Image (cartoon, coloured by chain):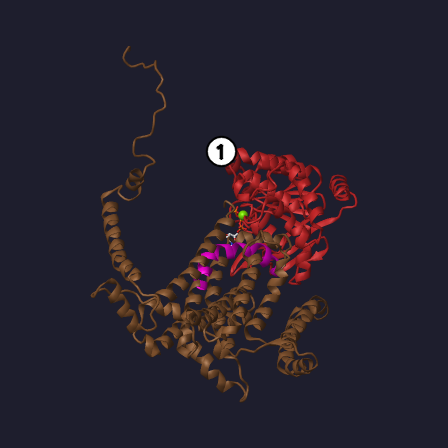
Amino acid sequence: MGQSGFVRKTMVPAAAPPMLEGTVIGWLRANLFNSWLNSALSVVFVTAVAYLLWQFIPWAFKSSWTANSLVECRQQIKAGFGEDVSGACWAVIRERYLQLIYGFYPADLYWRPNLTFVLMLIALAPVLFPTVSRKLLLFSCMYPFLGYWLLWGGSIWGVALVVAELALAFYLLSPLTARFGLLITIVGVVLATVLWWLFAVAPLQSLFHGILPLGLRAVPSNQFGGFTLSTIIGVTGIVASLPLGILWALGRRSDMLIVRSISVGFIELIRGVPLITLLFVASTLLNIFLPPGTSFDIILRVVIVVTLFSSGYVAEVIRGGLAALPVGQYEASDALGLDYWKSMRLVVLPQALKISIPGIVSSFIGLFKDTTLVSIIGLLDPLGLSNAIRADSAWNGIVWELYVFIAVMFFAFCFAMSRYSMHLERRLETGH
Amino acid sequence: MNELQNKGGNGSRAGIEKQFAVRIANMNKWFGTFHVLRDINLTVHLGERIVICGPSGSGKSTLIRCINRLEEHQQGTILVEDIELSSDLKNIDLIRSEVGMVFQHFNLFPHLTVMENCTLAPIWVRKIPRHEAEETARHFLEKVKIPDQAQKFPGQLSGGQQQRVAIARALCMRPRIMLFDEPTSALDPEMIKEVLDTMIELAEEGMTMLCVTHEMGFARQVADRVIFMDEGQIVEENSPEEFFNNPRSSRSKLFLSQILGH
Ligand SMILES: Nc1ncnc2c1ncn2[C@@H]1O[C@H](COP(=O)(O)OP(=O)(O)OP(=O)(O)O)[C@@H](O)[C@H]1O
Ligand SMILES: [Mg+2]
């Protein structure tokens, strides 16, 4: 019995952690070399990265920034770094970066895309971050018109007339709905808006412009290009395809047969046809259907096609989110007396969209990268421009430098979106 | 609220000047070809407390879900406070805002705080100003004994607390009738009591209640009538003393022996 009992007589003092804890070696051991498989993977991975950097870094740094042609580049590198060195010819970026950013936009008007971009960040701020003042949302609503006018220029009256009509429609919406019902009001307002755009804006614009000529120099669409063009198409597509995608997703789950059939038909059509095909439709086929003599801006057409395309994918992602919501959520909001739109807006969509954030952002990143496809129908996005630059005899044969530059720019944009989506997911976490 | 208490309380006890809360006549319902509710006739007066019990699958949930049109009946009539439930959306919304419902799995909105859960419908359906709705919500949260949790999210509360928030959320609409569908059967034993206490308090204030539950202690204590269902039919309708001590149908005898036997 005497052997089985134990009473501590001296207390164990606190000791320093084992030597490696909290050091670099300790971290390496815990994270990279904690098993044989992990160690092997670490070694292979580190070797591969080291090899790539070994190749890339000398190429990137034994480079020429000052030459005026590819041939001159090669001479400078040979002279500077030795006979058999092949380095990057960043000079092409130095010479053409403005073109890659602004396309053929008039150089003295670069401030307009710049200002539009800065204003875009301001307009997006209240949408992306709840801490920003809600009053800015009014500016966000006005921004699309302002941005359009700044970029394309022309008389202010055209934009003002469009905005005036929309504002009037917005204020009349609730009294008209009360009097005629939602459906008739919406159809009426859309019809009135289209008629206003088609028949009233142009004559009234020239009338007002005759009285008080206010405006910016017009820049035609064929001078747009580079990242400006990518951003215009990408951002407009993203902003417009989210609400449209929500509507398609709700339509697909609707009880009304017609609404459901149209939604299913649209979504399946969009998902079954490659974007390239739709872009060709936008660039060539549409002309056949439009009345002769009408010119329908090519960038506008592409934006519409890209928006519709993306909205089909966004709709499917959101439908997944809607389906993932427990049926009890729908029942609880019904039982509280919320009508369909209120229950969608206040209960269902906030949760469904939150579930869908990663998928939605993936669609948006895909859309933004897909804007490079417009080079195939002859628009000069950065990839289209890179072909144009290569066509210049001075830079004939240059490939990597342009692609690296374009890739870095796209990566920055897409990575920002990805980080924002992670931030959003964390912000909306409520512990369920 | 006070008006309701007086009317309800006196009405049902004294049997004078009774007002109808729910009247169901010759109601039938099918799920596809499955005849789930058969010839249901049930009248509930304002201020009455009804407990509905019966074996699993007997149609108890379906019956009370028909009362606020979460399920649609195909034959017969359902009147809630003299408004008939038909496919008229206006009537449905009207009835739903007068009838509160508490679910087995709480169904709180997880993206909203407790306070927002309680004020959502008052603000958007009843159009009550926000500060007034918050005042009401605080009153009812205190009543269900959830003080100081208003800013938490449902996911941060225990099951019993969540169910009491769900009761408060329904009460914030100031309903005249409350429906409960097995409000305690998803809870651990020690949490059942706190929810039952809340419901007993509510019953004592004269709220009209239709409650599907297997808590026979609760039924004995507060119910004016017990309704026993089996195979989609109302098999027995009785006072709690009679039902428990002296059940008339053989099915209720069997059910009671099973539920009280262990
Ligand atoms: N949406 C539905 N579609 C088809 N059948 C259903 C549906 N909901 C319920 N049922 C069936 O109807 C019957 C009655 O269901 P109900 O949920 O009303 O039973 P209950 O008495 O509430 O049972 P429990 O005590 O298990 O909750 C069951 O047989 C069930 O399978
Ligand atoms: Mg049930």
A70 on left or right of B236: left
CB of residue at label 1: within 8 Å of ligand 1? Answer: no
Q: Can you name the residue that lies furthest to the right here? A: B17
Q: Which is nearer the eye, A195 or B49?
A: A195
- Rendered residue at 45%/54% (across/down): A419
In this structure image, what is the colour of chain A?
brown
Q: Which is nearer the eye, A399 or B25?
A: A399
Q: Classify mark 1: residues with Cα within 10 Å, few (<14), some (14-19) or many (20+).
A: few
In this structure image, what is the colour of chain B?
red
Numbered disc 1: what chain? B
The residue singled out by tag 1 in the image is B262
Q: Which residues are magenta?
A: A340-364
Q: Position of residue A430 (x, y in %)?
A: 52, 46
Q: Which of the 4 quarters of the picture holds residue A256? A: bottom right
Q: How many marks?
A: 1
Q: Can you name the residue that lies furthest to the bottom here? A: A292
Q: Position of residue B38 (x, y in %)?
A: 58, 55
Note whether A388 is above or below A135 in the view shown.
below
B160 on left or right of A209: left
Q: Secondary structure at mark 1?
A: loop
